[in-house]
Amino acid sequence: MPAQPTAPGRTPGLHLSVALDGAGWHPAAWREPGARPAELLTARYWADLVAEAERGLLDFVTLEDALSLQSTDPRGPDGRTDLVRGRVDAVLTAARVAPLTRHIGLVPTVGTTHTEPFHISKAVATLDHVSLGRAGVRVKVSARPDEAAHIGRKAFAWYDGFDSPEGEALLRRLFDEAADHVEVQRRLWDSWEDDAEIRDTATGRFIDRDKLHYIDFEGAEFSVKGPSITPRPPQGQPVVTALAHRAEPYRLVGAAADVGFVTPADAAGARAIVAEIRAAQAAAGRADETVHVFGDLLVLLDDTAARAAGRLARLDDRAGQQLTSDARLFAGTPADLAELLVEWRAAGLTGFRLRPAALPHDLERITRDLVPELRRRGVFRTAYPTGATLRGLLGLPRPANRYATP
């Protein structure tokens, strides 16, 4: 397994990010005293959250998105009117926030099942230009029938658990398509060489056409000629991330992503997942590349564990049901969470993506309490490296252009 490099200018340690969604990851968070439900669709709300994350020196934020309304039912709308429903577009939100920040990475979620990779590659490349090299993308598949119905080009039967032969076959198809989606994006980002734009007013030459390349991709779902209409991003390749819960997405992370988000229940589970992703990475011929594996945790933080548990109970009571999540739920103190992160890091995780249960409360406890705890343990940065891109923060090299002549 390759060593995980450290970005210049930072203390060796773990990477830290947050996942932002609505008023927070608890369904009743919008009713908390500090919540801002009237502002969820405003640019200022998201700018304030990302600015807080940047004050905590976090590596990046992810922004949730989907082609369907939020729902407690994975098969489709649940008809509830007492919970947050409706979102703003993640890529457009990231582009709006980018000029208001300087260091933190911006990673919007995009679906691969119902979108064209040409459009996504162009949007993410634009975000990388606007942010001066701080863009990433979280790719996401969807088997939801209601999302398919919005687009009208595909139709899916719903399989509870996806453990039947038909369900597993659908998952393989969706994640194979996602891998092709990422491959097309990456080829399009490389379809312009770094010096393709000449911009010489004296000679009247703006572009060197020999440095634009057809990608000629032919796959099961996509046929893309190229080149892109957007010049190569500042990072060369924006950071590709994916959430993974089982074998199919583990293979996607190992073969195509720079960062995988995983959901272990404990350190032993983290160790097993990391081993599976490293095996997938080796099978894809990427054993010498850095692929980060981040643990996801849904967090409620307070001064004491009893107060955190009490707040969780109050939120559950307001929601009318107990909070459940694909990720482990942590309700406790920042110091206890720091101890857990250090323990899981020893199991092979290189970073963490924390999901604040209520915004801004739990985000502020992450940036103002957890981060100092991690710093006291010597495992988190004290400042952003000067001029670092998101790839730089994560210790990822800027890749060479596959089409450029050496």
Image: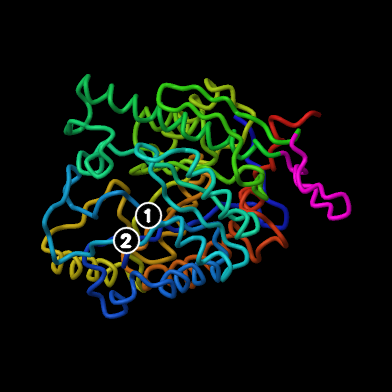
Compared across the picture, whether 189 is left or right of 160 comes to right
Query: Residues in magenta?
Result: 193-209
Which residue sits at x=63%, y=40%?
4
From the top left corner, tell me how far across and down residue 27 is, in percent.
22, 62
Disc marking residue 87: 2
Query: Is 116 located above or below residue 333 in the figure?
Result: above
- Magenta includes 194? yes
Query: Is 312 located above or below residue 330 in the figure?
Result: below
- Magenta includes 225? no
From the top left corner, tell me how far across and down residue 48 is, in percent.
46, 74
From the top left corner, tell me how far across and down residue 123 is, in percent.
51, 50
Q: Amino acid at mark 1?
A: Glu
Numbered disc 1: secondary structure: loop
Compared across the picture, whether 382 is left or right of 46 comes to right
Disc marking residue 404: none
Q: Nearer the viewer, residue 10 or 146?
A: 146
Query: Is 153 located above or below residue 241 in the figure?
Result: above
Residue 247 figure quarter: top left
Q: Identify the residue position indicated by label 1 in the image.
A: 64
The quarter of the rendered structure image containing the C terminus is top right
The quarter of the rendered structure image containing the N terminus is top right
Q: Are marks 2 and 1 in contact (CB under 8 Å)?
A: yes
Q: CA distance from mark 2 to mark 1?
A: 9 Å
Residue count near mark 2 (Cα–Cα under 10 Å), binned few <14, some 14–19, many ≥20: some
Which residue sits at x=26%, y=50%?
68
Query: Is 348 located above or below residue 62 in the figure?
Result: above
Numbered disc 2: secondary structure: loop
From the top left corner, tell me how far across and down residue 396 is, in percent.
65, 43
How is this picture coloured?
rainbow
Residue placed furthest toward the bottom: 33
Q: Nearer the viewer, mark 2 or mark 1?
A: 2
